[in-house]
Amino acid sequence: MRVPNLCDFSTLKSKIHNSLQLNNNQVVDEIHYRRPVEDTSNNIHFESMQLKNDMDVNTMLMYNDNFSFVGPIELLCIVGRTADVILNLLERPSIPTHDAVLYYNGRWNMPHQNIFVGYAFIGINPKKFDIPKGCSIDQLKDLIKQVAPKGNPPHGIHESQVVRRLFYRQPSHLEYSEKVLEFEIVELKCDDDVLKVLVESNY
């Protein structure tokens, strides 16, 4: 975007809002300027300067004139929600969920001893999704089918296919250290297994 010479803080925020194509529920909360500074050895360094008012914007424009050889103005913007949206979110009854990652048609790395410890899942196109509180094994399978990409195996799931088996990468502390985690692969077979996973995800 282009910043005019006689730019105030409100105009700058408006230009950023339009350049980022923000919607009516989003606002520019903070603006940080990458300000060039010259040291005693004539070396150029950069500092972060937050723009809060018209005077800060004028200072930014002055620095840009004095250090025009450095390049264009660089800004970091933090975008947030409007006050009305935040209030609506706070007043709306929340449904507790748990974050999950799905590896569709994946497999797990396995050591030669066939012991599933300390090895991560790998798979095609990991998908992040939320598991609702109180989810049963059948509901989880239906949810996974909805989240998995549509298409032909192994790159997608067909409508005629069903989720047969589920595996969970379960963390646990090593016997010799409470700060080191190991992982083992556990198959989820019933509602109680899913409940244990959801309880462990809170820790």
Image (cartoon, grey):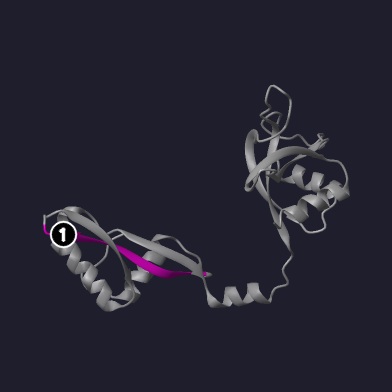
Q: Nearer the viewer, residue 40 or 70?
A: 40
Q: Position of residue 52 (x, y in %)?
A: 34, 75
Task: Tell me if 131 is positioned left or right of 74 in this view.
Answer: right
Q: Residue at x 22, y 73 (%)?
A: 58
Task: Tell me if 162 is positioned left or right of 89 in this view.
Answer: right
Task: Tell me if 53 is positioned left or right of 188 in this view.
Answer: left
Task: Tell me if 80 is positioned left or right of 187 in this view.
Answer: left
Q: Residue at x 70, y 43 (%)?
A: 175
Q: Nearer the viewer, residue 55 or 134?
A: 134
Where is 68 relative to 181, above or below? below
What amino acid is labelled 1 in the image? Glu
Where is 48 relative to 116, above or below? below
Q: Position of residue 76 (x, y in %)?
A: 37, 61
Specify the farthest residue to the top: 112
Q: Quadrant of residue 187?
A: top right
Q: Residue at x 69, y 42 (%)?
A: 102
Residue 183 in sight in this render: yes
Q: Position of residue 202 (x, y in %)?
A: 71, 58
Specify the farthest residue to the left: 41
Where is 120 relative to 91, above or below? above
Q: Which residues are magenta?
A: 26-40
Q: Position of residue 130 (x, y in %)?
A: 70, 53
Q: Residue at x 66, y 36 (%)?
A: 118
Label 1: few (<14), some (14–19) or many (≥20) C-alpha neighbours in 10 Å: few
Q: Would you name the residue on which mark 1 appears?
A: 38
Q: Secondary structure at mark 1?
A: strand
- Residue 117 sits inside the magenta stretch: no
